[in-house]
Image (cartoon, rainbow, N blue to C red):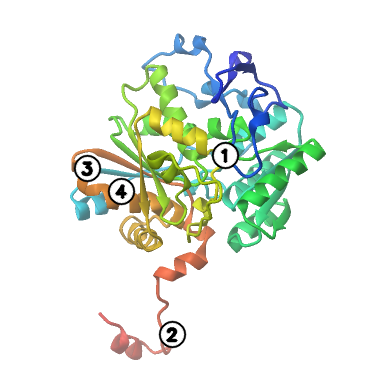
Amino acid sequence: MKEKFKYKCDSCGAVYNIQKDLMLCPNCRDENIEGIPLKGILKIQLPEEIKHSLNEKQKHNIFNFLPVEENYFPPISVGNTPLIEAKNIQRELGFKNIYLKFDGANPTGSFKDRASYLVSAFAKKNNQSEIVVASTGNAASSMAGIAAAAGQKTFIFMPESAPKAKLIQCLQYGAELIPIKGNYDKAFDLSLKFSQIKGFLNRNTAYNPMTIEGKKTVSFELNEQLNSEIDYLFLPVGDGVILSGVIKGFTDLKSLGMIKEIPKIIGVQAEKSCFIFNAFYYDNFDFNYKASTIADSISVNVARNGFTAVNDLKKVMGGMVLVSDEEILSAQNMLSRMSGIFCEPSSAASFAGFLKLKHSIAKNKSVVLLLTGHGLKDIDTALKSVKFPKSFEADIDFILDNLNL
């Protein structure tokens, strides 16, 4: 069955067999210019046979909907992350159905494990033991951790300004870390040159077809975890691959007859990292754009998945919203206090986006907020919204007298 999975070019529609060295469409890849969104992105097509083998009463195995056999996946548990009903937030805001999908519970604390898991399996199936990746932090630490479980070696190109927690994760997992004096875009281009020279598999987001495909698994999980239809799904957007992955998942689910409607998908970007927002609403693809936001995981100058993400969102009639850094920090703090979920700033952007649009959403609608990373990945930013107390004398009477109870 797996050989019946195919690649389809998102730009020209050409169909190809899945091959280890095929990353972008041969017809379209020559149009690519360093530093702009990729053309010729390949998406995986489900075999028609799968649609006719489904039993509605049977619990479905996600590996049946992925192009690599289950036995190739590394011995580490990825996915099946908690879906939490945010009851305190529901009461505070007057909504009946708000849910938090917390992917910070993945092994390396990031949603990116979903893509790394499939990339690692694809590498093993094709007898490749070295994987290269460029990242602002989460994809790097994710690939390093998953590869460590699989006995593979990771080479990481990452801006030297990335949060130290993510740098330390990569080193703990035994990856070869190559900090770059430059931004993510420069790291991306250097990593491609490196992987081509060395012949190593490149995991770069959007460039490797397995990244979008791996990320679709969250849509399948949400469909199982919520018995009712999802009305709205808010998610953070940087380069747009999570956005495309989630849309791919719900599109597959609908084609399989497992859902009736695709949720209203709302991508959230920081005001100062809004490449995809501008492209979506104003058809403005600014290839000289410079991003600057505290939410490092969604701080991207030129989104490499920009063309595809915008098209995907338009096809499902989704939307975008911008939030300020101040709104992100406030949302992060509110989420922690009212749900017990400490997520990193990029994840909190989902909640900030919902707070900005909540007045236009009926209170009985089902809303899911996708929280993509754990807060411990970026402590320095979290410190901006909390205040450390002064130390107390080691005397109970002093403590009681000075506590503001």
* Image position, residue 369 (x, y; %): 36, 45
Q: Is residue 221 visible?
A: no
Residue position for label 1 = 37
Q: CA distance from mark 4 to mark 1?
A: 27 Å
Kindly identify the amino acid type of the residue bearing the numbered disc 2.
Answer: Ser
Q: Please name the residue shown 73% across and 55% down the image.
A: 178
Reading the chain from its start, which is encountered first: label 1 or label 3?
1
Q: Please name the residue shown 41% across and 23% down the image.
A: 253
- Depth check, front residue: 239 or 132: 239
Q: CA distance from mark 4 to mark 2?
A: 37 Å
Numbered label attached to residue 391: 2
Between circles 3 and 2, the one closer to the viewer is 3
Reading the chain from its start, which is encountered first: label 1 or label 2?
1
Quarter of the image for residue 165 reads bottom right
Left-right relation of 365 to 395: left
Residue position for label 4 = 354
Q: Please name the residue shown 60% across and 57% down the image.
A: 166
Q: Quadrant of the N terminus?
A: top right
Q: Are marks 4 and 1 in contact (CB under 8 Å)?
A: no
Badge 2 element: loop
Residue position for label 3 = 361
Q: Are marks 1 and 3 in contact (CB under 8 Å)?
A: no
Q: Quadrant of the C terminus?
A: bottom left
Kindly identify the amino acid type of the residue bearing the numbered disc 1.
Answer: Pro
Q: Are marks 4 and 3 in contact (CB under 8 Å)?
A: yes
Numbered label attached to residue 330: none
Kindly identify the amino acid type of the residue bearing the numbered disc 3.
Answer: Ile
Left-right relation of 91 to 319: left
Reading the chain from its start, which is encountered first: label 4 or label 2?
4
On screen, residue 172 above or below 397: above
Between circles 1 and 3, the one closer to the viewer is 1
**Label 1: few (<14), some or many (≥20) within 10 Å?**
some
